[in-house]
C-alpha cells in the first residue's frame, strides 16, 4: 500500500474515532492479567491509542502492534514516540499471516478486528495461537450489533443504520461477531477462561461529533458510492442520510452505544 491509499474501508474520520479508544476502557477485561515484563501483541492495532496504554501496563515488556493499513501504522508509531515508549514497535502486515516467530508473546489482544475478517477470523485466531507461548492468553473483543442504541435517532438516522449494517454485511464484516467469539477461540485451540461484555458509549459532544463526522465521511465516500451503485438508495436519499447524521450530531441529547463481547482464551500449556 502506498501514499494516501488506505486499507479497504479505513477513512481518516474512522481513525480519529478509533483514536479515542483507551486501554483503560476497551482493554479493561485484560488488565487483571497484565504484569510488568509481559510480551504483548496488539492484533490490528489501528492508530495505536489502546496499544500505548497496554505498553504502559506491561513496561518494560516489549509490545508489538500489527496492522495492514500503512497510515495507521505510521500514526501509531508517532503516538508511541510522543508517549516516550521505545519498546513499542509496529509492523505493516496481515494479521492472518503474522510475520512473527512462533511462541514469542505472552499475551495477544484484539479489539474490533476479527469482525472485519469474516471466515478468516479463525485463521487470525490460529495465528495468535501460534505466536503465543504455551499458557499464553488471547484477549479478543468484538462488537455485537444486536444491541446498538442511538439516543435521539431520527427516521433518516435509522435508515442510515439499516443500510450501514447491510453494507458491512456485503463486505464480509460480521457486526454480530461478538457472540461467535468463544466458538472461534475454542476452534483455534484456546481454552476459554472468561467471557464478559462492555459497551462503547459516545455521549460527550466531542465524541458524538467525531462519531458523526466519521459517518458523514463514509456517506460522502465508500459507503455512499456503494449504496448508490447497488441501487439501495439514490443520490437524494444519501443526502437525506447525511442530513440525518448531521442533525443527530447537533442534538444535545444525542448518544450512541454498542455492546462488545470480550473473551479471554488460554493456549493450553501442553499444546
Ligand atoms: C475497527 S479498527 C480497530 C483498531 C484498533 N484495534 C482499535 O480498536 O482502535 C480495525 C483495524 O483492523 C485493521 N485490519 C483489518 N483487517 C486486517 C488484516 N487482515 N490485517 C491487518 N490489519 C487489519 C484495520 O486496518 C483497522 O486498523
Image (cartoon, grey):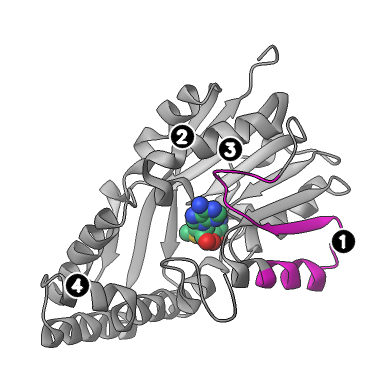
Label 2 crowd bin: few (<14), some (14–19), many (20+), radius 10 Å:
many
Residue under label 3, please give it: 139
Picture layout, residue 155 above or below residue 124: below
Q: Quadrant of the N terminus?
A: bottom right
The one of 167 and 214 positioned closer to us in this rendering: 167
Query: Left of 150 or right of it: where is 186?
Result: right
Judging from the image, what secondary structure is the residue with disc 2 in?
helix
Q: Is residue 160 above or below residue 23?
A: below
Q: Earlier in the sequence, mark 3 or mark 2?
A: 2
Chain part drawn in magenta: 74-99
Decide whether residue 80 is among the magenta residues: yes
Q: Where is residue 268 drawn, in percent x and y?
A: 64, 17
Q: Dots 3 and 4: beta carbons under 8 Å?
A: no
Query: Mark 4 against mark 1, which lies toward the viewer?
Result: 4
Q: In this image, 251 relative to 30: left or right?
A: left
User: Is residue 54 visible to the viewer in this orientation of the structure?
Assistant: no
Residue picked out by circle 1: 86
Instruction: Look at the numbered discs 4 and 1 and tell me whether their residues touch, using CB distance below 8 Å.
Output: no
Distance from the alpha carbon under mark 3 to that under mark 1: 24 Å
Spot occupied by residue 222 in the image (x, y as percentages of width and height): 33, 75
Q: Distance between the Cα atoms at labels 2 and 4?
A: 29 Å
- Which mark is drawn over residue 227? 4
Q: Residue at x 37, y 81 (%)?
A: 217
Q: Secondary structure at mark 4?
A: helix
Identify the disc placed on residue 122.
2
Of labels 2 and 4, earlier in sequence is 2
Residue 177 horizontal side relative to residue 133, left or right: left
Density class for disc 3 (Cα within 10 Å; few <14, some 14-19, many ≥20) is many
Specify the label residue 118 is tagged with. Answer: none
Amino acid at each position: 500500500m502506498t501514499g494516501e491509499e488506505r486499507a479497504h474501508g479505513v477513512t481518516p474520520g474512522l481513525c480519529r474515532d478509533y483514536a479515542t479508544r483507551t486501554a483503560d476502557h476497551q482493554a479493561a477485561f485484560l488488565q487483571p492479567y497484565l504484569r510488568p515484563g509481559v510480551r504483548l501483541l496488539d492484533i490490528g492495532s489501528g492508530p495505536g491509542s489502546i496499544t500505548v496504554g497496554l505498553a504502559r501496563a506491561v513496561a518494560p515488556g516489549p509490545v508489538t502492534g500489527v496492522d495492514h493499513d500503512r497510515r495507521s501504522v505510521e500514526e501509531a508509531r508517532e503516538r508511541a514516540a510522543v508517549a516516550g515508549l521505545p519498546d513499542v514497535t509496529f509492523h505493516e502486515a496481515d494479521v492472518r499471516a503474522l510475520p512473527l516467530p512462533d511462541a514469542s508473546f505472552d499475551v495477544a489482544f484484539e479489539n474490533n478486528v476479527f469482525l472485519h475478517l469474516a471466515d478468516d477470523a479463525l485463521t487470525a485466531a490460529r495465528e495468535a495461537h501460534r505466536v503465543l507461548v504455551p499458557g499464553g492468553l488471547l484477549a479478543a473483543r468484538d462488537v455485537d450489533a444486536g444491541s446498538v442504541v442511538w439516543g435521539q435517532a431520527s427516521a433518516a438516522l435509522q435508515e442510515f443504520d439499516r443500510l450501514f449494517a447491510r453494507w458491512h454485511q456485503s463486505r464480509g464484516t460480521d457486526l454480530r461477531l461478538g457472540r461467535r467469539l468463544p466458538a472461534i477461540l475454542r476452534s483455534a485451540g484456546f481454552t476459554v477462561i472468561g467471557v464478559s461484555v462492555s459497551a462503547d458509549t459516545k455521549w460527550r459532544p466531542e465524541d458524538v461529533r467525531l462519531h458523526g463526522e466519521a459517518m458523514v465521511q463514509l456517506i460522502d465516500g465508500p459507503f455512499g458510492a456503494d449504496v448508490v451503485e447497488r441501487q439501495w438508495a439514490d443520490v437524494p436519499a444519501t443526502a437525506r442520510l447525511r442530513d440525518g447524521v448531521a442533525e443527530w450530531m447537533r442534538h444535545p441529547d444525542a448518544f450512541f452505544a454498542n455492546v462488545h463481547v470480550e473473551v479471554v482464551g488460554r493456549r493450553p500449556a501442553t499444546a
